[in-house]
Each structure stands twice: as C-alpha cells, then as structure tokens.
Amino acid sequence: MAASEGPLKGVKVLDLSRILAGPTCTQLLGDLGASVIKIENPGTGGDDTRQWGPPYVTDAEGNRSDLSAYFMSANRNKKSVALDIATAEGQAEIRRLASHADILIENFKPGGLAKYGLDYATLSKEFPGLVYCSISGYGQTGPNASKPGYDLMAQGYGGIMSLTGDPEGAPMKVGVGIADVMCGMYASVGILAALRHRDLTGEGQQIDLALVDAQIAWLINEGVNYLTSGSVPQRRGNGHPNIVPYEVYETADGHVILAVGNDGQFKRFCSFLGRSELAEDPRFATNPSRLEHRDALNAILRPSMQALDTKEVISGLEALKVPVGPVQTLDQVFDTEQVAARHMKIDMQAQPGPVSLIGNPLNLSRTPVTYRSAPPVCGADTEAVLNAENPFED
C-alpha cells in the first residue's frame, strides 16, 4: 500500500450523524483514508452545527457561507449529500448507498430510523455484512433510552461536572464538548473492531454507544476512587485527587502548571524553592503524607511561587527535570514552534475560500493521515454522488 492511500483506503462510510460525536468519528476515519458520504437534511440547512456561529467562512466578496468554525472542526474529508430521508425517494437512495457501504453511523433517537426502514434490524437483513454504529444520549436500552442527549447533559448525568470547577463554586462543564469528542473516539475504535470481525467472518453487527456510558468510562481514577472507597470525590479546582503538588500555581506575572509525580521530583522542587527542609518534613516527605496535608503544604508553596516570575519557574524546574509548564491561550498555542513541527495547524481550500483547521494527532510511519478535501458546503456533492455508479469513488 502506498503511503498516500491511507490505512483505511477502500473503506466506505455512510454518515447519517450530525453535531459532534458521530462527525468526530467519521472525520477520523476519513483522515485515515476512508471514503465518507455525509447525509444532510436539505429542509433544515444540513447539520445543526452549520448554524452554530459565528465565526463563519466568508467568500471573496465577504458573503457568509454555511461553514461555521464549529462545523468545520469535525467535517473534512467528506462528501455532502442533501437528502430527505423522510421521503420514499430518500429512503431508497439511503438503501442504495448502504449497499455499497462497509459502515453506517447514525445518531438518531433509539428507534427513530425504524419508521423509515433504515434501522439496523431492517438493513442488516438486506446487508448482513454492514457495520452499523448507533450513537445516542443514553443508549438503545435502559429507562432513559428515549431521552435526548447532548454533551452538556452527558457531562452532568455522568458525573464529570461534579468533579470540575472551583471547590467553592458551581459544578462546571469542560470548556469543549469533550463528552461528544470522546464518544466519537470510542465509536471509531468500536467500528474498527467490528470491521475486523466482518473481514474475518463476513458478519456485520450493531454498535450501541451512549454519550453517558462513554463519559462514565472516562471518569477513570476518580470513578474507581469512589468505587473503591465509597467516598464521593469533591471538586478540587486544578488540584489532583491522588498527587500533591500537581496543579496550577500563581506566579508573579501569571500561572504555571506544576506536576510533581514522585518524591524525588518533590525533593528537587523544594531545593529550587530554597526550602529543602520541606522534603524532610514527615507531613510532606511522601505523596500519601502530602495528600493528607495538602492544605498545609499549599499554604507554604503558594506564597513562594507567587514571588517568582513564570519564566524563572519554568526554566529552573526544567533544568532540574521537574515537570512544569505554561498555561497558554489559544493564540499562544497555535504560534508555537511545537505546533508547527507537529503539523497541528493545517490550511485547506474550501469552496468559499481558505480555511485553517486543527490537524490530526495520529502519526503513522507508513500510512499517514491525509487531508484530501476541506469541509463541504451543504449538498456540495449531491448530484455527483446520486448519479454515480460507484458513489463512494473519489
């Protein structure tokens, strides 16, 4: 396989999803070489996120397109087909596309596609090798299956908001739609596993994935802390539940992240501060002791850190191999040499004009990701796809 083809070249994805979880998954598959056809409702102007702006891409005359920044974040390497699946003609076209597809992904409410004959039970009879991924708020089963699900609701129901934010403040969501994004990541893993099974046996299957289930899965150590101890974790702001000191500290001119992962690093950190005696204090000598005396330790560390400049702290601790780093705004992030070296900002040409996007973090040595097409305007490929003998052909 040539490197430019991508590891998923030849894999055909029919994408009936919208907003963020499903599109995150299908963009990842597309970056890896899969051919993705995105179905959008012409009656609503397409994917909901096309209206989630500003900002929008404008053309050379300054006219606003339907490419919102939100939509573009998860929809490159796809063809857009405007199709009304509520009509008999639209349903017939979806079945025709499904006959060519390896994967179908959708995020309708459980049972929502059955009235159109596009649910897994129906399509699997006609296309037994189809990998069919269903994403919903609470999954296909359980007492909440019929309830709608959005990222914010998943973060609330699944517990992450109870762990996020200032200890004295309100529960706080993560700054981006992380429940959606992580659900999309789980979806891509599940799809590739099901595709592997299909290639070995010829059998397709349905993947039932819930936003809330995915969010609960990435409670990780805090979730297992609770299951092990029976104690409900409390919000700690930027503090870590199991490591001290491991949080954001104010400096004389900003903030730094300090991530002391073991006792040796703590000794070197104390030496940097000129407070070597802290590492010998029984209250602070080991991480379990520091956890027990978190407040007392921070009462000492915070004034010491506030007396130092950010650059002084970062350069001094880096020299001692103590994990430390800046808290950057996005203009600083995308202006770094590291981002340039890792190709985490890319430029593409969309139909209305040039766009800048976030790069894919996967670096495969033999089959790298490719950026073949910019996010499309709604229905840009409808005629070409519907009239093609092989609709997934690039």
Image (cartoon, rainbow, N blue to C red):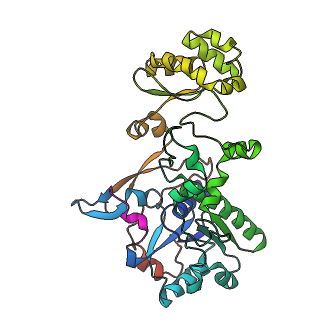
Q: Is residue 316 above or below residue 374?
A: above
Relative vertical location of residue 109 with respect to residue 155 in this rendering, above or below? below
In the drawing, does residue 116 fall left or right of residue 380? right
Q: Quadrant of residue 101?
A: bottom right
Viewport quadrant of the N terminus: bottom right
Work out whether residue 336 can be spotted. yes
> Is residue 6 visible in this depiction of the protein?
no
Residue at 41% in and 37% down = 329
Picture coordinates of residue 196 (x, y %)? 72, 64
Horizontal placement of 201 versus 252: left or right? right
Does residue 363 lie above or below 390 as drawn?
above
x and y percentages locating residue 289 in the rendered image: 70, 23
The residue at 54%/43% (across/down) is 164
Along the line of sight, the residue nearer the viewer: 204 or 257: 257
Residue at (50, 61) in percent of width and height: 20
Pick the front one: 108 or 283: 283
How many numbered marks, from 0 up? 0
141 is within the stretch colored magenta:
no
Splitting the image into 4 quarters, where does residue 213 fall? bottom right
Residue 48 among those drawn in magenta: yes
Expressed as whole percent of the image width and height from the top left, the position of residue 157 reads 59, 57
Q: Main secondary structure of the magenta part?
A: loop
Q: Position of residue 60 (x, y in %)?
A: 24, 59
The magenta stretch is: 45-55
In the rendered view, tell whether residue 219 sits above or below residue 249. Answer: below
